Image: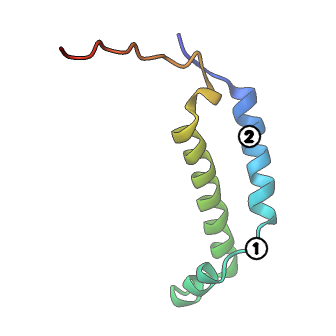
Amino acid sequence: MPTIQRDALHAFVDRQLLKIESTPIPPELTGLGVSERLQPDEVLALWFGAGIASQIGMVLAMEPGTFVEPWPVLEESPAAA
């Protein structure tokens, strides 16, 4: 039965959070904050949330076996004759 490798997932999230927190907010997002009348704290929260979601989502979509073991292997179906 597949299980989530929580230690690996937590370590990955910690590494990604360090990257997100140390990356400056792009000017486009800052501009959006101004046009949408968001407070600086709200823009920062949006940046963190988007960063977390994209980093986790991308690795789970591209390499799900990194955090789910064993990853099911699909049996190849025979080619139609």
Q: Position of residue 54 (x, y in %)?
A: 58, 54
- In the picture shown, does residue 41 fall above or below 7? below
Q: Residue furthest left?
A: 81
Q: Amino acid at mark 2?
A: Phe
Q: What residue sits 68% from the left and 71% below the top?
A: 44
The part of the image, by quadrant, that contains residue 47 is bottom right
Quadrant where the C terminus is found in the figure: top left
Counting labels gives: 2
Q: Are marks 2 and 1 in contact (CB under 8 Å)?
A: no
Residue 32 relative to residue 9: left or right: left
| Residue in the foreground of this view, choosing between 32 and 28 | 28
Q: Residue furthest bottom?
A: 35
Residue at image mark 2: 12
Q: What residue sits 81% from the left and 64% below the top?
A: 22
Q: What residue sits 76% from the left and 73% below the top?
A: 24
Residue at image mark 1: 24
Residue 25 relative to residue 46: left or right: right
